[in-house]
Image: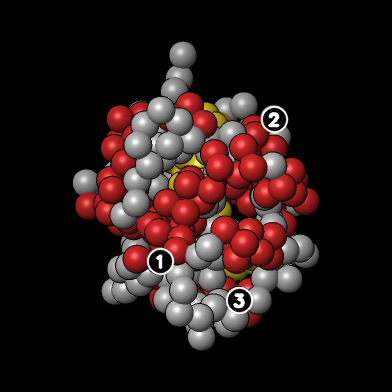
Amino acid sequence: MKERCQLFLLHFAGGSCYSFDFLKKQIDPDIEFIPLEIPGRGKRFREELLKNKKSVIDDYFNQISNLRNNQPYLIYGHSMGATIGLSVTEKMESIEDPPCHLVVSGNPGPGIKECNRSKEKIKRYLMKDDDFKKELRKLGGVPEEVLQNDELYKFFSPIMRADFEVLEKDNFSEEGIQLKTPIYALMGSDEETSGKISNWNAFTSKKFTSEILEGNHFFIYNHTEKITRVLEKCFEVLVLQN
């Protein structure tokens, strides 16, 4: 049996390998759907949480390297997954096994700060619980029952804090990266930094494409068909080129 093209998916802060289930049934069966996750959640909940960016990048890099076949592949990351995906792609390029495309969403690219956070001194992972819950509500994507239930919040909070620590301790370690891989960027129209989506263009020497879709930070859940079409289109372009 011929091996299939591969799609590796990198989740957002607080996410897991289940975060992309909404796409799984829509993707062409000729594409191998591979949602990844870092330690401390999902199928890896017994493993210790990672709290620095290098460890997360290395973890994803090792997962992808071990799962690779000889077929073309994509890396798709949302929010935190988009930031990490940039460095993971750079590492894959360094071993001469680059993806045919890096697809990113919910993220204007490294170096762009949220307007309402640029003046704040307290990083999210260091916030007191009440302030942290307000921040999570503002971002969306976290069920209200998790924030109101002490037991659920106690389980979920350390995961979110660890992921924010990864992003906020060294928030622009990507400076100077320029991929040889094309980038396709998507953002929601209600995201305050959506107007800076073209920032991603600075991180590739190849083709850059961007689109703004209606919605907030988690607009992806309302655009399943569109996201699927973008991912499949990136594979189709490669086939046409060959």
For the residue pair 213 and 153, the one nearer the viewer reads as: 153
Determine crowd level at label 2: few under 14, some 14-19, many 20+ residues with C-alpha closer than 10 A: few
Q: Is residue 126 visible?
A: yes
Amino acid type shown at disc 3: Thr
* Residue 193, numbered label: 3
Residue drawn at x 44%, y 23% is 3
The residue tagged with tag 2: helix, strand or loop? loop
Where is residue 75? Give x, y as percent.
Answer: 46, 47
The mark nearer the N terminus, 2 or 3, is 2
Q: Element at badge 1?
A: helix
Q: Nearer the viewer, mark 1 or mark 2?
A: 1
Query: Extreme bottom residue here?
Result: 119
Percent x, y of residue 27: 65, 35
**Residue 219 figure quarter:** bottom right
Whole-number angstrom distance, CA of label 1 to CA of label 2: 34 Å
Q: Mark 1 sits on what residue?
A: 168
Kind of residue at badge 2: Lys
Which residue is under mark 2? Answer: 25
